[in-house]
């Protein structure tokens, strides 16, 4: 029999449970890791990506070039220049003490304070720290020459006002971050500032920057103002002379086109230079309150009792309601009237006068009597029609609506105060607009400062659309014009008369309220005059307000001469034909021609005082304007002679404009740009002289 195989006993492998356990643990671990990866890659992808970008990248926002601010003729009042700013990447500094010491010497900083800032930034592991912004060319070059590791440069824009303080309260100014802080710069900041760009800095694991990417900024829109640079200059010059003569606290002058509501000039004194607005405090005696007073816009923010200039409301209402006629006799009661127990006096006693003469003599008694005829309710309605008690809507921040109580809150004696300009507060802009309604045949045009808004490519995207409403009839306005003219002919404003032009207007002298006693002061006054010329077809309304003049304080003595000075220079410049004594006109043109070079010469001096960075950019600005330098710099005139300006390089249109301003006759030959002229630059010339200029185009 075959042998049976031996029987073997199979024993279980003791390592298999351990293997299974390890495999199971590995599977669970892989599932956990996989789930975690899914959670991180899917669920928290956005959060982790953003964190990584924050660690590896630093974004520095850059400002866009602000749009231009231009006057009505396209002349630049504000523009942006490209300058250097410097920042530090703290982790790249190798020797903080040395860097702080060397930088402090160049930047006029205190080395210990700068070193503390840099070390603090390093300790906080900051990736970026501004060192100095908007440096002039000299300092920027000196910083670059240090060649310090970790110090980088960034191009920024800086606002520049080529005319210095001219129209400062209209233009305003901007801060270091290029944000508008006052004036048009603030009011239209969104349009002017454009869309900012950005610079992205990429860093490695040690936070060292190794690459950068820049997103270009988009320039802002340009604002074209109604302001005329030359008219503004004339107004500011006249105010400056008045301030020097009267030692007044402040002064305001407004030049308005009554037919359009366009403000040709809005001037305040004292003023400031918006190129260095931060130093106004030092100029004002290191007083923050004084600095704010200088920067405030009195034309819109100062409320004053208008006094006799407000009498036009009562006289207009009485004429419009057929309650009086210019030739009607009115008893002025020898300058005294009692209204509900209050006695009101005229400055000079008068008996019976015509209504027209009563306005010329500024009779309080006549104004009150006419106000009583009209009645409180109807008088209040006319006050509102003329625009008092409401903001004019002029495009500047800080405008006040003045003070006008509702007629229901009038006291019984109010009808004896308001017709002569008491118990009411107005602004200079409101008064200019009110007289503009009379000058414009009874239609009040909303005063405004912005003509249009343009894109960077000069496309117009917004145009002014001022409101217009009728205040009084054209017939009433026609009656008022000769009545207001009589104020300058035989009344209180004889010093407002013009050679060659008829003039109409009204003086005002008002006592200020003493803040301590809350009664009328016997030493502080507001002198004013508001008028227009020529009488039949007014080209301009000019309002002048002098606050707290020392010595003489009557409107006819203090404010009327300022009106006369402004109008004398402005009307010929605006090509307004004389309507009285035309033989006086050549003298006007000669006087204007002499003043115009003063403006251009002053601007030339300011241009020469620009810092190196701005000087270096002028050719670029000219190139952007097609190679044309827009402003003409005149040679200064001596005594009463005129000197021929250099017109070479100017276009036919610009040369013609300059000749017209100087009263010269232009004989132009050819097209393109001027290359030869006769008389030569600097030669003595006379008003009316013929100037021959050859124009040509370069190959």
Image (cartoon, rainbow, N blue to C red):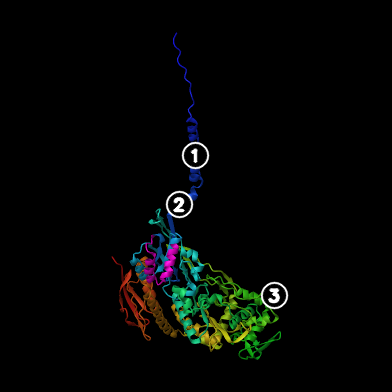
Q: Is residue 98 magenta?
A: yes
Query: Could you say where residue 659 lies in the image, as x and y percent from the top left?
Result: 37, 77
Q: Secondary structure of the magenta portion, mostly?
A: helix
Q: Secondary structure at mark 1?
A: helix
268 and 339: which is toward the camera? 268
Residue 408: assigned label = 3
Q: Residue 95 occupies which quadrant of the picture?
A: bottom left
**Which residues fall within the magenta stretch?**
92-121
Mark 1 or mark 2: whose residue is earlier in sequence: 1
Query: Could you say where residue 514 lies in the image, as x and y percent from the top left?
Result: 61, 83
Residue 29: assigned label = 1
The answer to whether residue 209 of the structure is visible from this angle is yes
Determine which residue is flagged by label 2. 52
Q: Is residue 325 magenta?
A: no
Between the C-alphas of marks 3 and 2, the distance is 69 Å
The residue mark sitting in front, 3 or 1, is 1
């Amino acid at each position: 029999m075959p042998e049976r195989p031996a029987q073997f006993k199979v024993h279980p492998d003791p390592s298999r449970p351990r293997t299974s356990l390890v495999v199971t643990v590995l599977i669970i671990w892989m599932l956990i890791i996989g789930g975690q990866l899914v959670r991180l890659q899917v669920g928290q992808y956005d959060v982790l990506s953003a964190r990584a970008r924050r660690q590896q990248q630093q974004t520095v926002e850059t400002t866009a070039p602000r749009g231009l601010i231009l006057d009505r003729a396209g002349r630049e009042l504000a523009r942006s220049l490209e300058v250097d700013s410097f920042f530090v990447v703290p982790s790249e500094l190798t020797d903080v003490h040395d860097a702080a010491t060397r930088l402090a010497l160049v930047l006029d900083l205190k080395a210990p304070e700068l070193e503390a800032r840099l070390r603090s930034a390093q300790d906080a592991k900051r990736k970026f720290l501004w060192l100095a912004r908007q440096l002039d060319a000299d300092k920027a070059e000196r910083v670059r020459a240090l060649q310090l590791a970790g110090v980088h440069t960034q191009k920024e824009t800086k606002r520049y006002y080529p005319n210095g303080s001219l129209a400062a309260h209209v233009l305003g100014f901007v801060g270091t971050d290029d944000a508008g802080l006052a004036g048009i710069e603030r009011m239209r900041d969104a349009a002017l500032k454009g869309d900012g760009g950005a610079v992205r800095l990429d860093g490695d694991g040690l936070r060292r920057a190794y690459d950068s990417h820049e997103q270009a900024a988009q320039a802002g829109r340009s604002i074209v103002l109604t302001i005329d640079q030359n008219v503004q200059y004339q107004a500011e010059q006249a105010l400056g002379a008045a301030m020097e003569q009267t030692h007044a606290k402040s002064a305001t002058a407004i030049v308005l086109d009554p037919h359009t509501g366009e403000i040709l000039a809005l001037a305040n004194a004292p003023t400031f230079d918006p190129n260095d607005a931060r130093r106004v405090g030092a100029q004002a005696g290191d007083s923050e309150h004084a600095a704010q007073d200088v920067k405030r816009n009195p034309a819109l923010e100062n409320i004053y009792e208008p006094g006799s200039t407000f009498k036009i409301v009562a006289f207009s209402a009485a004429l419009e309601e057929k309650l009086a006629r210019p030739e009607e006799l009115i008893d002025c009661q020898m300058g005294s009237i009692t209204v509900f127990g209050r006695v009101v006096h005229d400055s000079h006693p008068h008996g019976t006068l015509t209504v027209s003469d009563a306005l010329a003599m500024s009779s309080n008694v006549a104004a009150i009597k006419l106000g009583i005829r009209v009645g409180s309710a109807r008088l209040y309605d006319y006050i509102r029609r003329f625009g008092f008690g409401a903001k004019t809507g002029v495009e500047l921040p800080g405008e006040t609506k003045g003070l006008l109580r509702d007629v229901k809150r009038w006291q019984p004696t109010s009808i004896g105060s308001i017709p002569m300009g008491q118990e009411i507060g107005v602004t200079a802009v409101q008064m200019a607009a009110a007289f503009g309604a009379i000058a414009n045949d009874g239609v009040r045009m909303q005063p405004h400062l912005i003509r249009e808004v343009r894109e960077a490519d000069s496309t117009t995207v917004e145009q002014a659309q001022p409101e217009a409403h009728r205040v009084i009839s054209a017939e009433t306005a026609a009656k008022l014009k000769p009545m207001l003219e009589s104020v300058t002919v035989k009344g209180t404003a004889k010093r407002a008369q013009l050679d060659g032009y008829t003039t109409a207007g009204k003086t005002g002298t008002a006592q200020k309220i003493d803040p301590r006693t809350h009664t009328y002061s016997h030493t502080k006054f507001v002198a004013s005059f508001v008028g227009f010329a020529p009488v039949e077809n007014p080209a301009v309304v000019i309002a002048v307000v002098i606050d707290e003049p020392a010595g003489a304080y009557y409107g006819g003595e203090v404010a009327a001469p300022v009106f006369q000075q402004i109008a004398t220079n402005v009307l010929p410049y605006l090509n307004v034909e004389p309507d009285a004594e035309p033989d006086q006109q050549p003298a006007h043109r000669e006087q204007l021609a002499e003043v115009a070079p003063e403006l251009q010469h002053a601007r030339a001096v300011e241009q020469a005082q620009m810092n190196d960075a701005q000087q270096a950019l002028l050719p670029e600005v000219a190139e952007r304007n097609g190679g044309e330098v827009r402003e003409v710099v005149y040679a200064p005139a001596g005594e009463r002679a005129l000197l021929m300006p250099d017109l070479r390089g100017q276009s036919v249109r610009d040369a013609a404009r300059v000749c017209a301003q100087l009263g010269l006759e232009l004989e132009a030959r050819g097209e393109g740009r001027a290359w030869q002229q006769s008389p030569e630059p600097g030669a003595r010339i006379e008003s009316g002289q013929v100037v021959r200029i050859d124009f040509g185009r370069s190959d």
